[in-house]
Image (cartoon, rainbow, N blue to C red):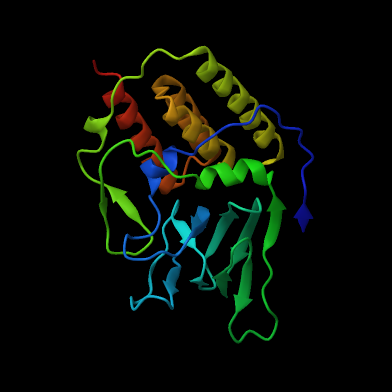
Amino acid sequence: MMIKPKIKLSGFIGLAVFFAFLTAGAAAQTSLPDVGLITKLSGAATYWNKAENHKPAQVQAFMKVRQGDYLKLPAAASLTLLYFASGRQETWKGPATLLAGAAKSTAVGGQKTAPRPEVKLFPAHATRQMAGTPLKLCPASLSTSGVIQTMGARCEAAAKPAAPLSAEAQRQIRAAQQVYRDLRKVAAADDITPELYFLGVLAKYKQYPEMIKVADAMLQKRPNDTSVIDLQARVLRQAHAGAQP
């Protein structure tokens, strides 16, 4: 089922700075572009890329996906993948193996009937900003998993208090807040894509108290999701560190 929301968005901004806080994309040794983000994961799944000589690794929630990545879901697994360039959000249920393209996935493998994802479309000019070059809030250490970059233990201590906002910065935040409200109108009840977008804008301007409110809203949507619980905890630590003089 394809749902195309009709949203009129104006005054849009938003470098998704917060994605540096979640994951910083591909490892330095590869030039494969990031094309999407895993926004929801249930069960175990693996991924690999033929351009590398790594063994299949575990898929993680909030992991960025590169063009050419293969993702394999067993029968009990499902995942939601949001493509930055197209605004296409795909929810796949296993068993399935998919190949990530530039703007959509393709089912591969030997299934007699190729699985099809549930598809929803978000405004592409909003999702494209979520792939913008991130401004790192704190030093990161590369993991060996390929596409994941995880924060070190001292990440939160690197945050700095926010400077007073300029009139233009205030205008941009208000515009982003309206985009956030519009995205919430078309997102599913448990879809945290709108919150991930707005967290990126708030992180850019170091608006830590507002980040906590958005993280709380995210947890209300998925109160039993351990990955969201962990993400909220990271936001709280980052906000606490940023509030220190």
Q: Position of residue 83 (x, y in %)?
A: 59, 55
- Total marks in image: 0
Residue 175 visible at all:
yes
In the rendered view of the protein, which quadrant contains the C terminus? top left
Q: Position of residue 194 (x, y in %)?
A: 58, 37
Q: Quadrant of residue 154?
A: top left
Q: Where is 92 relative to 213, above or below?
A: below
Horizontally, residue 122 falls left or right of residue 82, namely right
In the rendered view of the protein, which quadrant contains the N terminus? bottom right
State the residue at coordinates (20%, 42%): 153
Q: Quadrant of residue 173?
A: top right
State the residue at coordinates (65%, 42%): 125
State the residue at coordinates (34%, 77%): 55
> Which residue lies most toward the left here?
154
Q: Where is 21 relative to 103, above or below?
A: above
Q: Quadrant of residue 145?
A: bottom left
Q: Position of residue 84 (x, y in %)?
A: 58, 51
Horizontally, residue 3 falls left or right of residue 129, namely right
- The residue closer to the viewer here, 227 or 140, is 140
Q: Where is 244 relative to 97, above or below?
A: above
Horizontally, residue 179 falls left or right of residue 144, namely right
- The residue closer to the viewer here, 212 or 166, is 166
Residue 189 visible at all:
no
Horizontally, residue 132 falls left or right of residue 229, namely right
